[in-house]
Amino acid sequence: MKWFYKAAAVLVLLGLGAGVKSYFFPASEPMQYLTSPVTRGDIRETVLATGTLTAFKQVSVGAQASGQVNSLHVELGDTVKEGDLIAEIDAQSQENSLAIAEADLEKIKAQRAAKVATLQQAQSEFTRQKNMLKSKATSRQDYENAQATLAETKADIAALDAQIVAATIDVDTAKVDLGYTKITAPMDGVVVAVITKKGQTVNASQSTPTIVKLAQLDTMTVEAEVSEADVIRVKPGQKVYFTILGEPDNRYEATLRSIEPAPDSIAGDDDGTTTSSSDEAIYYNALFDVANPDHKLRISMTAEVTIVLDEAKDVLLIPESALGAKDGPGTYSVRVLAGDDRVEVRKVRTGLTDSVNIQVLDGVAEGDRVILGESGADAVSGRRRPSMRF
C-alpha cells in the first residue's frame, strides 16, 4: 500500500503545480488589433483663424471749423446720402471774417481805381513834357520828373493788382471756412456713432474733432488673424468661410482678398520696426469681404474663420493616427492587416490632411484595413495578473 500513497502524493503535487502555473502564468492569448478600413471621400486642408467684422468702408466725419454745434441733423442708425447735412456749427465768427475780407478787397479795388485816374494824369503830363522838350519849351529835368511819375504810378497799380489777388484769395478762404460750419456726409452710409452732441463746443485749431462716424454696411470685411506659422501657406484667391457666435450653424462663404504684409503691432512703432518679445505670438490679418444686404452682420462681431488651402474629392483616406515612421517627404510606413490576420508593412505616399484623416496617393487600396493600435486579450478583458510576493 505504500506505493499507493506515494503515487497519490505525486498526483496531488502535480495538480497543485498545474494550478499555480495556470493562476500565476496564464497562457498567452492571440494579439488583437484596432483597425480602420481605407475609404474614399473628400478632404480639405484648412487653416483656422479668429476674425473680427469691420465695415467695408468707414469714415470719421469731423469739423474743420471751431465753435458751438448749433444743430445735429442725424441720429444713431440713420441712413444718409452723400452731401446730406449732418451738423451745423455757429457761423458768426466765420461770417464776420468773410465780411472783413470782402471789405478789404473792395478797399484795394477803390485804391486801384484812384491810381488809374492818377495814371491818366501822369500820362498826359508826360506827353506834354515830351512835346515841349522837342520844341525846347521845357527843361529836361521837368521831362524826367514827368516820366518818373508815370512809371511810379504804373508800379503802384501793379502792386494794387497783386494785393487784389491776395485779397480775393482771402475772400475765397473765408467762404471756405464759412462752408466748414455746415458739415455734410462725404459718402452714402449709416451713422454708426455720434461723437459730438448738440450744444457742444468743438475746437479745430489743433486737431479735427469727430462729429459722427459713417460706415457702409452692405458689404462687410473680415479681418482674420493668421499665425506666422500658417501665413506662408495662405494666399489671395483661396476659399474661405466663417460662422458667427449668434449663428454657429450658418456658414458664410467668400474668397480671400489679401493678406496684410505686417502685423497690427507695427502701427504703434514710430520707427516702423516691431518691438514684440520673442515669446509673443505674431498674427497677420487676412482680409475678405462678404455681402450683408440685410445688415445682419455688425461691426466688431467675432468670426470663426476657416481658410481652405486645398481640397480633393473622391480620394483614398485613412486615419492620420495609422501613420508609422516617416521615410521621406510625404512617405510613411503603414501596417496593414491581411486577410489571414498577417501584418504587412507598406510604404504609402500621402497628400492632404485635415488633422483627422489623410489622403493616400498609393501604397494601399480601398477596403484594406490599416492598423491603428494593438492589444492583448488581457488588456481587452481588463484582467490583471496578481503580483507574486515572497
Image (cartoon, rainbow, N blue to C red):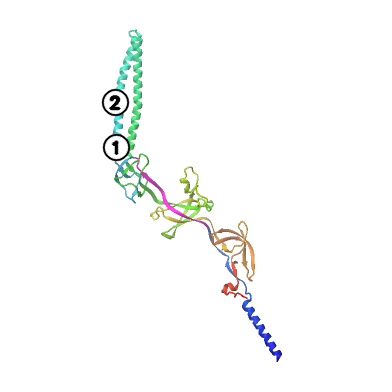
Q: Quadrant of the N terminus?
A: bottom right
Q: Position of residue 82 (x, y in %)?
A: 35, 45
Residue at 42 percent of width and 60 percent of height: 247
Q: Amino acid at mark 1?
A: Ser
Q: Position of residue 335 (x, y in %)?
A: 62, 65
**Residue of label 1:** 93
Locate residue 329: give its quadrant.
Answer: bottom right
Classify 156 as above or below 323: above
Q: Which sits in the foreground, 270 or 191?
A: 270
Q: Amino acid at mark 2?
A: Ala
- Mark 2 or 1: the one toward you: 1
Residue at 30 percent of width and 24 percent of height: 111
Classify 93 as above or below 295: above
Please tell me how crowded label 1 is: few (under 14), some (14-19), or many (20+) other residues with Cα within 10 Å: some
**Residue of label 2:** 110
The prevailing secondary structure element of the residues shown in magenta is: strand
Q: Secondary structure at mark 1?
A: helix
Locate residue 154: give its quadrant.
Answer: top left
Horizontally, residue 376 falls left or right of residue 220, namely: right
Contact (Cβ within 8 Å) of mark 2 with mark 1: no
Residue at 38 percent of width and 45 percent of height: 60
Residue at the far right in the pictured view: 3
Residue 376 visible here: yes
Q: Position of residue 345 (x, y in %)?
A: 64, 64
Q: Position of residue 361 (x, y in %)?
A: 60, 60
Q: CA distance from mark 2 to mark 1?
A: 26 Å
Q: Secondary structure at mark 2?
A: helix
